[in-house]
Amino acid sequence: MKKKATLKFNVTDIFASNRFRGFAEYGNVYLRVNNRWQNRTGNLSFTYRFGNNKVQGARERKTGSEEEANRAG
């Protein structure tokens, strides 16, 4: 596709490491929590750039203060 296309694949939480562990104590009640969410996801994206790829950048412009500084020193 003449270097105009991009294909990306992304996976979040690939090792299922997103978990919550906690412990609480209130009076005679002891609570221990060990939770693991099942949120492993994959995304596939395709991008195609169309139009003119050879757009010239903006030219450098000098301000009056820069020109004055160059003259002075």
Image: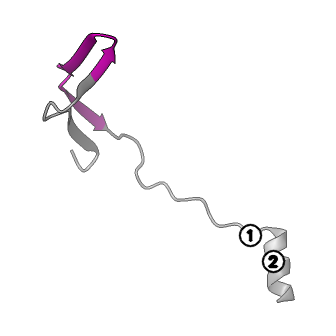
- Asked if 24 appears above or below 51 in the picture, the reply is above
Name the residue tied to disc 2: 67
Quarter of the image where one finds residue 72 = bottom right
The quadrant of the picture occupied by the C terminus is bottom right
Residue occupying image coordinates x 31% and y 17%? 25
Give how far across and how far down residue 23 sits, in percent: 27, 22
Residue under the point 30% across and 37% down: 48
Q: Residue furthest front?
A: 28
- Amino acid type, callout 2: Glu
Name the foreground residue: 4 vs 24.
24
Residue 40 is covered by the magenta coloring? yes
Measured Cα–Cα span from mark 1 to mark 2: 7 Å
Viewer-proximal residue, 49 or 43? 43
Specify whether 27 is left or right of 66: left
Work out whether residue 58 can be spotted.
yes
Task: Give the main secondary structure, helix, strand or loop, of the magenta stretch.
Answer: strand
Tell me if residue 16 comes above or below residue 39 in the rendering. Answer: below
Q: Is residue 53 left or right of residue 34?
A: right
Query: Nearest the camera: 50 or 67?
Result: 67
| Circle 2 crowding by C-alpha within 10 Å: few under 14, some 14–19, many from 20 | few
- Magenta span: 23-47
Residue 69, image x and y in percent? 82, 80
Circles 1 and 2 in contact, beta carbons < 8 Å: yes
Color scheme of the displayed model: one colour
The residue where tag 1 is placed is 62
Amino acid on which the number 1 mark rests in the picture: Lys
